[in-house]
Amino acid sequence: MKKVILSIMLTAGAASAWAQEPGQPADSATDSVALSSVSLDEVVVKAEKPQLSGKDGIMTVDLPAIVKGKPVTNVLEALGYLPGVTDNGGKIALTGTDQVTIILNGEPTNMPVGNLYQLLSSTPVDRLKNVEIMYTAPAKYHVSGAVINVNLRTPRPIDGLQAQVRTGYTQTRYATFGAGFAATYAVGAWAFDLNYSLSRSKTFARESQRSDHLVGHSRTLVEENQNQASRSITNNIYASATYKFSEKSNLKLTYNARLESHERGANYATGTFGSFVNRHTYPSPPSFHYLSFRYQMPWSTVIGGDYTHYSERSGQHLSSLTTGEAKVISANSQRINRLHLYADQTHDIADWELSYGIEYQHSDDRSSQRYILPENSGFDGSTEEQLFNAYLGFGHSFPFGLSLNASGKAEIYKRDGKSRRNLTPQLGATFYKTHKSIFQLNLSTLRIYPSYWELHGATTYLTDYSVIEGNPQLQPSLNYSGQFSYIFMRKYIATLYVQYKDKGDAQLPYQSPDELKLIFKTLNMDYKRTVGLNIHIPFNIRSLLKSSATVNIFHQREKASHFHDISFDNKKWIFYGGLDNTLRLSSKIPVALSLDFAYVSPSLQGLSDLTKMWRLDAGLKWNFGKDRTCELDLKYEDMFNTWSPTMTIKSHGQDFRMKIYDMSRNFKLTFLWRFNGFKPKDTSIDTSRFGAGR
């Protein structure tokens, strides 16, 4: 609650000056009042800072105000508190959409999701300015479908060096240690941003499987218990430099890299067929490099591009601990080079915004898989992929309260000599007469392409019984979605949504009818359809408790006519509920406590059924030191280890059950030190009295 306190001392002489016309004589009553003065008590005006605003189908959220006081240290953690957003183990999902893309400052981030998440997790939450939720992103962002645009504060010369040093410790079954440094600095026309993090992690996961496998007319019960452990040292580097030619023109260069070393993993399985160990080694650890440029011209033209290089070499050795016999010996290799270029133009014509642009992407994928054991041909080759699109869009705000943006994109996709043409329209609209009631409508289409590795048809052996198979025939899916939102008092949100995913895919276990083999393979279904209502209600109890409740009720249906050799039509009503609470005993005590709860009713995935899940998270945030520049955050996530489902398939001759354990319970301890070391000495003007406080 933001308080504005006004102390007003009025004299009757001033009051009479307001009450009478110039030159009008005062009567006796007025004269008597004029001889005295009246002192009014302090007037306290309480006003709550709006959390939300909307325009052109875009929802702008004051996320820094929402996460204030919570044990949140980085941008990725903060995104989990956005209205309509769920954070499932660091994976961000937006209710009412099948897939959401995260971009920074309205600029495309054409990097793998894992690397983007690493960057966000190492970006201090203090850098946040606001966040825009776009169920339908304008085509100029070169992203189809839903987008979360994270706007970060831009450094100014007056700010000097602003930096943060952090170190952290996370305890699951094993301990993970990390440290990082983030800094921004601006001088003259230059602005610099540096972010580096180093982590040493060791992870553990456990699962059990019970498979009553039918081959011919007889069944065999196969049971397995698996323990998976991996470790690695990861370096994440992000650096950008921006040169400002004028208020409307700038050039930005960005470099991002992720380098891993000392990576290895092992999967220990014990069950019906004996005990096995599956070891994974990395002769050449995964490495990722991303370099981009973006040039904003004075006449609203933007040209940009990026280059991505990814390489990885790994080996697999599966052997029996019972007999010592080697079962699988293989080597995998992948090297991808991708070039992406784009150009955009915007015109303002009589209060209408007209935008158009082109985009080109070329990918060169050189991958191989070689087997020593068992007899398997593997593959070795290169694949070229090209993507070209052009778009046309417009936006306008009408005087009667309607603002909208609409665009259409024509796309040509080529791979292995085959081409595919798509036309994807987008529409986003907002209507309001006053900010008390805001209505938003979004309609979008999105085509989702399979991963490079999956299309090669690679085979990965998990145990002597379980195997993952690639699928060269896997088709891209086309997702249609629509959302209608009502925003009340710029804080309460109700969103009615529908999704239809044509050729939606899923990777599910399948018991082969010909042999005792459990196959995990991603296959296209006929469709996935979801219809639901999501409600977000924040509320406060004075300045002590800040809470928000989320309710999402939806009907999910997934249908396949040809899933291997069977068909299914699975549907179910599903409920999600969440409650986030932050308790602050006093503004004079720099300690805040948080307690968050979430629940998901039984759900489904393909022909499988998933059990209910719930979790309870607790946290503490303590600011201390001079000017409270130091911060200590403690967080205990999934305290009772209940945020893991059990998968069950029991239809069409399939009888399978898998339980996952120890996936999300962890204890985090993070220490931060923020500092502002110096001011630039060679500025051309004295700016010490200028600049808006933040």
Image (cartoon, rainbow, N blue to C red):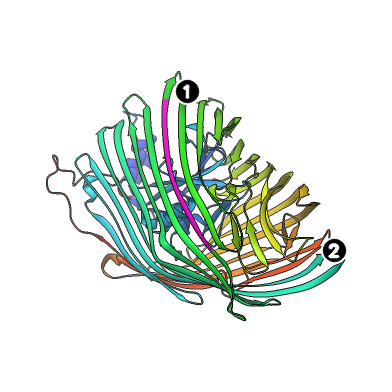
Residue 678 horizontal side relative to residue 115, left or right: left
Q: Residue furthest top?
A: 350
Residue 49 makes an appearance in the image: yes
Residue, disc 2: 216
> Label for residue 354?
1
Considering the whole magenta stretch, tell me its main secondary structure.
Answer: strand
Between 501 and 543, the one lying in front of the other is 501
Between 662 and 340, the one lying in front of the other is 340
* Percent coordinates x, y for residue 535 in the rendering: 64, 51
* Percent coordinates x, y for residue 580 in the rendering: 56, 63
Between 260 and 32, the one lying in front of the other is 260
Q: Residues within 10 Å of mark 1 (few under 14, many from 20)?
A: some
Tell me the amino acid under the disc marked 2. Gly
- Residue 334 belongs to magenta span: yes
Q: Which residues are magenta?
A: 330-345
Element assignment for label 2: loop
Q: Is residue 276 above or below residue 198?
A: below
Q: Quadrant of residue 690?
A: top left
- Residue 429 belongs to magenta span: no
First in residue order: circle 2 vs circle 1: 2
Residue 407 makes an appearance in the image: no
Between 649 and 185, the one lying in front of the other is 649
* Percent coordinates x, y for residue 633 in the rendering: 41, 70
Q: Residue furthest right?
A: 217
* Percent coordinates x, y for residue 517 in the rendering: 71, 64
Instruction: Tell me what residue is drawn at x 32 percent, y 41 percent.
Output: 14
Element assignment for label 1: strand
Instruction: Tell me what residue is drawn at x 67 percent, y 44 percent.
Output: 497
Task: Please name which of the two marks, 2 or 1, marks the residue nearer to the observer.
Answer: 2
